[in-house]
Amino acid sequence: MLDRRAWWVPAALVLAVAVPARAADQPVAAGAGQLTRDLTSEDDDVAIAAAKKLGEGGGAAALVGGLAMGLRPAVAAEALAALGKARDPRAVAVLLLYAGNVNAPVRLAAVKALGQQGDPRAVELLLERLGDSHPQVRAAAAEALAARKVTRATQRLMLLMARNDAGAAGPLGALIAPSAIPQLAELHGRVDDNVLATALGEFLKRPEVPDRLRVDVVKTVGRLPGAAATAALVEYLASVPEKERRPSKEEAQRLIDQRGSK
């Protein structure tokens, strides 16, 4: 369920769970004092520029503090993005809170930033965001879970795929068990061909997949119309070392040549 705060987060709550910062913890951004003041400027351009500079210059503590006190949505989104790039452990608590914000762009920024953190606390929140009402937020959560190889997400991603959710396709292909590929292929005719091609194409690029299964998947992709299926085959070929020979590579090349001749 989304947090119904319009754009603010209670400072006491964030500061109670945030990791205390010491002066020696990180380098301090040049002119951090002025940048911290600019972060709460009534001019969004000034505040956004300050957030970017604080993120680049080791000003994570100032960003956390600003978000704890409350920033306007456009500024909050930039501050959250800056925290993601900073990858500071002090950022996790505030990112977890903002990932439930009522404003979709703010949630999206928080989820993307969480995806850049190695903290295990992010996993449950990312799984929860697969049920977000906004497709971009769902997609960002799915991509982050796939990057972490969280196989627990597979079932939820399959359900999203069955609903034709394009953002779930690539991450599902990256996580799905080889034994479940027939279940994925059965979605042909029930979901958009481009969505299915994207999922199968991502699966093809995984190095651990047995090549006999790859051949079957390549043939399935080859039967799908559209640019996404062609792109999936081309990207698969590009993922195979040039001098490596494998039946699935030859089949993919044959299908690409066949498509090109039509």
Image (cartoon, rainbow, N blue to C red):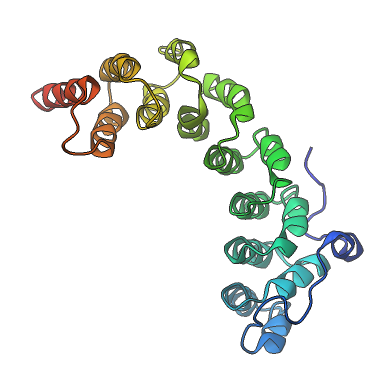
In this image, 57 relative to 250: left or right? right
Task: Determine the image quadrant of residue 138.
Answer: top right
In this image, 90 relative to 46: left or right? right
Q: Report the number of discs.
A: 0
In this image, 180 relative to 262: left or right? right
- The residue shown at (60%, 34%) is 150
- The residue shown at (65%, 62%) is 80
User: With respect to residue 46, does 13 lie above or below?
Assistant: above
User: With respect to residue 113, does 209 lie above or below?
Assistant: above
- The residue shown at (78%, 52%) is 97
The percent coordinates of residue 26 (x first, y second) are 67, 76
Front residue of 34 and 173: 173
Regarding residue 196, the answer to whether it shows in the image is yes
The percent coordinates of residue 224 (x first, y second) are 30, 18
Front residue of 199 and 241: 241
The percent coordinates of residue 227 (x first, y second) are 27, 31
Regarding residue 132, the answer to whether it shows in the image is no
The percent coordinates of residue 57 (x first, y second) are 59, 78
Farthest residue to the left: give it: 261
Quadrant occupied by the N terminus: top right
Quadrant occupied by the C terminus: top left
Task: Determine the image quadrant of residue 237.
Answer: top left
